[in-house]
Image: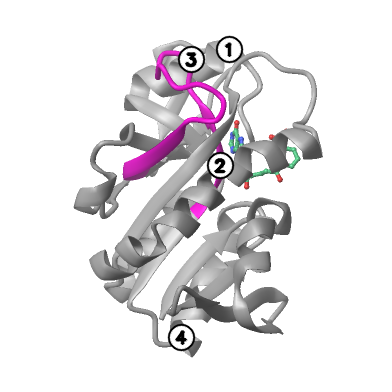
């Protein structure tokens, strides 16, 4: 069975609607939906937002079910120099915990932050995804809404996309020796912003990667 991780239900509505033989259940507050798409056995997990939720969900998932491969998906923010646009689909080659350390001041210079954990976790990129934009993803504890900080993070790590769960699921997969693919669609460019994304923006961007996963589910299964 393949495990599919999304942070929120909004980000996986299309996939939920496409599952046949659906079984809904929850374990220790984590929501799971078991079902099939094109004869592929799937376990959809709605982890909740952030590293803690993602870690809990993935540990529960791998302890309770026999999982041969994992796909982490949803939306993400593109760093300004990445060349990515809203709606682009992007694949992670590696994930980095990008904001664990000592924040010395709120400037974005090299001395402003001392990193404690900037461990890199390698993701699996199957052959059929190699033509998509790919690179380093950064997992952060809060969405970056400041251009200076965005430039600092992308330069420091050569990052192209940020999100809030990827490194956590990838790390758990590494420990359980389960291959992990991360593929997201871009919902926003990481820059100065004063407001959260609207439900419409989240829904529109997340449709794109869900459609891609549905169209290629057999290829995902064959490669995992
Ligand atoms: O970014 C927002 O303004 C926002 C506000 C309310 C809800 C959400 C979500 O449900 C999505 C959160 C989900 O998306 C990933 N994400 C998307 N954009 C970014 C970003 O610029 N920086 C970090 N993470 C981002 C993240 O994985 C969240 O779980 C979003």
Image label count: 4
Residue at image position (49%, 76%) is 42
Residue at image position (50%, 52%) is 73
Q: Which badge, 4 or 1, is on the more N-terminal residue? A: 4
Q: Which mark is residue 92?
A: none
Q: Which residue is mark 4?
A: 63
The percent position of residue 172, horizontal first and vertical second, equals: 40, 66
Q: CA distance from mark 2 to mark 4?
A: 31 Å
Q: Which residue is mark 2?
A: 208
146 up-or-down from 72: above or below: above
Residue at image position (33%, 78%) is 68
Q: CA distance from mark 1 to mark 2?
A: 26 Å
Residues marked 3 and 1 touching at CB (< 8 Å): yes
Q: Which residue is mark 1?
A: 147
Q: CA distance from mark 2 to mark 3?
A: 20 Å
Q: Which badge, 4 or 3, is on the more N-terminal residue? A: 4
Query: Which corner quadrant of the figure contains ligand 1?
Result: top right
169 up-or-down from 146: above or below: below
Q: Which residue is mark 3?
A: 80
């Amino acid at each position: 069975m393949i495990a599919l991780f999304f942070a929120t239900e909004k980000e996986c509505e299309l996939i939920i609607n496409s599952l046949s033989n659906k079984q809904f259940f929850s374990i220790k507050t984590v929501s799971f939906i078991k079902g099939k798409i094109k004869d592929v056995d799937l376990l959809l997990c709605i982890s909740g937002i952030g590293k803690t939720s993602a870690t809990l969900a993935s540990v529960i998932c791998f302890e309770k079910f026999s999982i041969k491969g994992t796909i982490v998906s949803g939306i993400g923010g593109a760093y300004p120099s990445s060349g990515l646009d809203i709606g682009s689909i992007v694949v992670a080659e590696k994930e980095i915990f990008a904001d664990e350390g000592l924040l010395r001041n709120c400037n974005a210079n090299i001395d402003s932050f001392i990193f404690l954990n900037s461990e890199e976790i390698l993701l699996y990129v199957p052959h059929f995804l190699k033509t998509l934009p790919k690179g380093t993803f950064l997992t952060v504890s809060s969405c970056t809404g400041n251009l200076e900080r965005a430039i600092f993070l992308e330069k420091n790590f050569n990052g192209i996309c940020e999100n809030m769960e990827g490194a956590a699921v990838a790390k758990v997969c590494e420990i359980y020796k389960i291959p992990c693919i991360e593929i997201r669609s871009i919902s926003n460019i990481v820059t100065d912003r004063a407001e959260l994304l609207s439900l419409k923006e989240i829904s529109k961007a997340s449709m794109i990667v869900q459609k891609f996963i549905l169209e290629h589910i057999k290829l995902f299964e064959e490669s995992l």
